[in-house]
Amino acid sequence: MGKWSKKSISFVTSFILAGSLLAVPVGSTAEAAATHASPIAKSVLSVKIEDATISELERSMETGKLTSEQLVQFYLDRIAEYDNSINSIISINKDALAEAKQLDQERKAGKVRGALHGIPVILKDNFDTYDMPTTAGSLSLEGSIPLDDAYQTKKLREEGAIILGKANLHEFAFGFETISSLGGQTYNPYDTTRYPGGSSGGTAAAVTSNFVTVGLGTDTGGSIRIPSSFNDLVGIRPTMGLASRDGIIPLALSQDVGGPIARTVEDAAIVLDAIAGYDPADPVTEASIGKVPQTYTHYLKKNGLKKARIGVVRALFGNDPQINKVMDQAIEDMKEQGAEVYEVTIPNLNEILAYPSLSGFEFKFQLNDYLASLGPNAPVHSLTDIINSGLFHPSLKSGLIARNNKVSLDNDPEYLRIITNRPKLSKESLMTTFNEYGLDALVYPTSNALPAVVGSGQGAGNANRLSPFSGFPAISVPAGFSDSGLPIGMELLGKAFDESTLIKLAYSYQEATNNRKAPVLK
């Protein structure tokens, strides 16, 4: 079932292609997890779960050393013990343990649904779930249960994943701080006085804290990659058209994608396998036909950097000496693994980065289409209703009103100028650089700012714009830490539908450096 009107999605798509089960209520997630807490769960485990990969957990379940029920219980225990100080989870699926028991029974009977059988996943709370509220972090949508799953949610369930719960986000995915009227402020597990990045900060904080195995986020202008960087994680922003956005609360369909946030490149590749592919409800995914490999895990090669050609974009580095020091070391590490590294310049870079996000134009119309998909019982039916309700974080007020004042996309000359020219200029300029040097990827800091102290402003630079403006894929991987122990991420940008190369390069770098370190929770 499509979530947007045909007119809305086809209008944006034409430019892109050319260039009753209830969740635990908010405010009680840790308490609710505590009601499931079991001191037995930790004592009977014969495997170490913290930072275990999906494949390691699957092998433990196959050999009988671990059950999915025990795995879910372990995560519920950790959420109950630690999330009060991090505040990453908006709601917990009350039926997670029952679903785990069912999946354990299926495994015993010889039925394994897929690579994620029995694996708990956290969803950013803008992915539709038919059995849990989907709120975008807004009090205006509290208790709103969609009529069906988002496409990506459905694909995860088909692979045997358990939706453990929903994660906090910057309300309506508007910013990098991850604060919402429904979920409050999420904190960075590496330093709880600081932001976790955003807008998928709740997903990232939960995954890095070992509250869940893996998660999904969305990215309109950095919202998967920046929280991945700030939480020492791997985040993939897929090529526009690789994975359906059907059932994701939209911010700007010309830029929106959903993708994995994981502790390892391997886990991110497994999740990408599950969510990639054509969905008639999102016409832009027609471009993926014939371009999705049998499995992205085939590209997990430790020697993947050997003879790889990497372009360093110094213009995107910023002025933070700690970040630049980590990046210089990352470049040397890639060279040591056999990569050929070139200092490159992207034509028209300043002009490309000067363009604005189109969320200021598209949000009202695409959100209204989404709200219409919820049916007559939706708590609100339009952006006007949301504004009139006052049920949103006060920091959003001016942005919501400005977006609501937009009258039309079809007749807005500034919007038509941007959506016509920006993708073309971005793609052509990037491909000029790729082709000139025969590059496999471009590299630069995911964010040129460190996680800021809560209460101050959070910057990130503008390197995050290249992927959404071009539609090309990007992956953020852990590159090191600041002097005070704050994670720093490195972003690799690839050519359209070349996620396999990015995964190969990132995996090789990960295996050679082992940069990830889990936070010490208190």
Image (tube, rainbow, N blue to C red):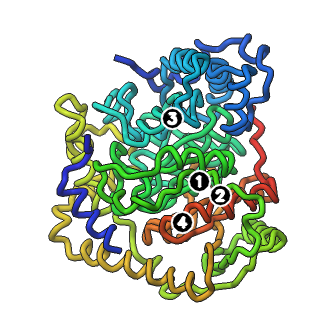
Q: Which mark is residue 299?
A: 2
Q: The residue under label 3 is which amino acid type? A: Glu
Q: Is residue 366 visible?
A: yes
The vertical placement of 269 against 444, above or below, is above
Residue identifier under label 3: 159
User: Residue 504: x percent and y percent?
Assistant: 67, 61
- Count neighbours of disc 2 (C-alpha within 10 A) and say few if under 14, some if 14 to 19, many if 20 or more: many
Residue identifier under label 1: 296
Q: The residue under label 2 is which amino acid type? A: Tyr
Q: CA distance from mark 1 to mark 4?
A: 10 Å
Q: The residue under label 1 is which amino acid type? A: Tyr
Q: Earlier in the sequence, mark 4 or mark 2?
A: 2
| Mark 2: secondary structure | helix
Q: Which mark is residue 64?
A: none
- Quadrant containing the C terminus in the rendered view: top right
Residue identifier under label 4: 498
